[in-house]
Amino acid sequence: MDKLRVGVVGCGGIFTIAHRPAYLKMDDVEIVALCDINREHAERFRPDFPNAAIYTDYRDMFANAPIDSVDICTPNYLHAPIAIAAMEAGKHVFCEKPDATRPEDVLAMKATAEKTGKTLMVMRNNRYVPTSVFAHDYIRSGNAGEIYAAHCGWQRRRGIPGKGGWFTDKEKSGGGPLIDLGVHMIDLALWMMGNPTPVAVSGSTYSKFAGSDLSDSENSRFGEAKADGVYNVEDLAMGFVRMDNGATLTIECSWASNIQKERRFVELYGTKAGLKWDTEELTLFEERDGVLMDSVPNIPGREGVYGHGQNLRHFADVVLYGARPDFVPSQGVNIVKLISALYQSAATGREVLL
């Protein structure tokens, strides 16, 4: 094919700020259909994609639009059913994170991709941040030695998204900051560690800020807040994970907690060197000729690069040109199983074996 013809399902916040600008820069990708249950949400993008057909039901789009691929930007609980229906209709799929809200759903997505032979990829944008690429290559080159432990998280002081809407309704979101934010940093940590398989998880969750409307994070503007809506998810999750290779990972994710400031981080402990990825800046802690040294490598363009556009570009390269995928569905299975196990451990007070 000369161009990848894409149909978008879900024309809300993440499509607006991350996917739309990426597509506008791609000459070999064309948005030919836009779908949203609220037709007005899709219609507002006509100036950007004037030739795109508008739908309010994704099934109609799959049956009638001339699309090769589907980009899913919907609430979390819809990811799996839409992805499965798209692949069964002969379409490739790119899906926003999280892959799914339940292990059985992400397993069904993987099985459908294998059965249909269609490409299935899920947003892992932090892998494409320049400091992430540098850190991954640094570790793969053996400079850090054995990565035997890691610590990751995304902490917000006050940044509950769409309070009362689908973000804070467990049935639709799957959970709070662990599944919303944690999926980013957990994936980044596992990817840098060489994608070991989680085998045991323990954790705790807390919901302490349901009554607060304070915000100091621009991310709290995501979603549509409802004053009389549901808030039955955590605002802080903490966990401990053991891997099949003996490595361990600790996790801390919050939408709201009394901390100094918002922070995204991955810290890795290696036998030769350690690495700290902190809000897209990288610091190395190395041993050189018997001397302990700290350094900040010079990586051009390391600030303010979230990687969504690069991730979507990579998906197009996989489908159009046969590039080797950086993400495979089994990695999504491991993430969703880990998150589900942490929620289970928090509910039971016991470690969960995978």
Image (cartoon, grey):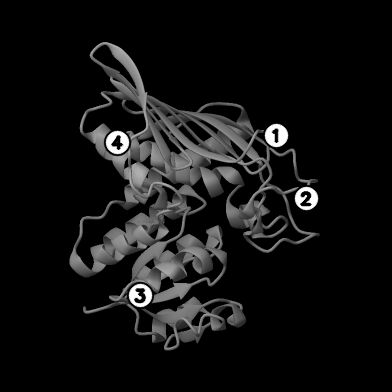
The answer to whether the residue labelled 4 contacts the one labelled 3, judged by CB atoms less than 8 Å apart, is no
Q: Which residue is mark 1?
A: 258
Q: To which residue does mark 2 refer?
A: 213
Up/down of 15 relative to 269, above or below: below
Q: CA distance from mark 2 to mark 4?
A: 40 Å
Q: Amino acid at mark 4?
A: Gly
For label 1, the SS is loop
Q: Residues within 10 Å of mark 4 (few under 14, many from 20)?
A: few
Alpha carbon separation for disc pair 4 and 1: 33 Å
* Residue at x 46%, y 41% (from the top left corner): 185
Label for residue 194?
4
How far apart are the two marked residues, 3 and 2, measured between alpha carbons?
Answer: 43 Å
Mark 3 residue crowding within 10 angstroms, few (<14) / some (14–19) / many (20+): some
From the image, tell me which residue sits under label 3: 89
Query: Is residue 40 shown above or below 117?
Result: below
Where residue 263 appears, x then y in whole percent? 55, 39
Q: Position of residue 331 (x, y in %)?
A: 35, 46
* Type of amino acid at the residue the image marks with label 3: Ala
